[in-house]
Amino acid sequence: MRTLANYTIFEGKVWLLHVFETENGNIVHYPFEKELEATRYIEGIAIVCRANGKNDDIIKNTPPMPGEKWKQYAERMAGLLSEHGTRPPYSVYAVEFPLLRPVKLK
C-alpha cells in the first residue's frame, strides 16, 4: 500500500508530504516528488503505527480538539503513539477532512 498525506505520523515523528509504502511488514518512506500510480492520497493525516489494541484505542478515542490544526493534532498523536513501538505488523489509519475521524485502511 502506498499513501501520501499532508502529514504522516510514524515512529514518533510527523512527516510533511512524505510517501509511505507498506508491504510484507516493511515500511519505506521518502519525500513526495511526483505522483506515482496507485498512490492513496489522504487529505489530512495518515497514521502508520504498530498494530495493537492499545494504539487502536488511542487513535479511536483521541479525536482532534475543536479548532486544532492538522499539524498540532499530528504532533499530539505522535507523542501518544511513539511509546508503543512501531515494529511490524503495522496498521495504517487516515484522518481526513471533513470527517476528521480515524478510518483504518490496513
Image: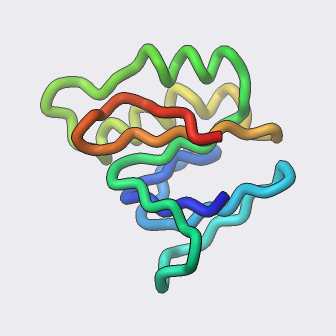
Q: What color scheme is it? A: rainbow
Relative to 68, residue 42 above or below: below
Q: Quadrant of the N terminus?
A: bottom right
Q: Residue, x 55% and y 80% (percent of image)?
A: 36
Residue 69 lies, in percent from the top left, at 22, 42
The total number of labels drawn is: 0
Q: Residue placed farthest to the left in the image?
A: 67
Residue drawn at x 20%, y 34% is: 68
- Decide if residue 68 is on the left or right side of residue 72: left
Q: Quadrant of residue 23?
A: bottom right
Q: Tell me if 63 is positioned left or right of 104 in this view.
A: left
Residue name at image x 62 percent, y 23 percent: 55
Residue 19 x/y as whole percent: 55, 67
Q: Residue furthest bottom?
A: 34
Q: Is residue 91 left or right of residue 66?
A: right
Q: Position of residue 76 (x, y in %)?
A: 40, 32
Relative height, residue 54 to residue 68 (above, below): above
Which residue does the image show at 34% across and 23% down from the upper left?
63
> What is the x, y in percent for residue 66?
16, 25
* Quadrant assignment for the C terminus: top right
Above or below 45: residue 54: above
Q: Residue furthest right?
A: 24
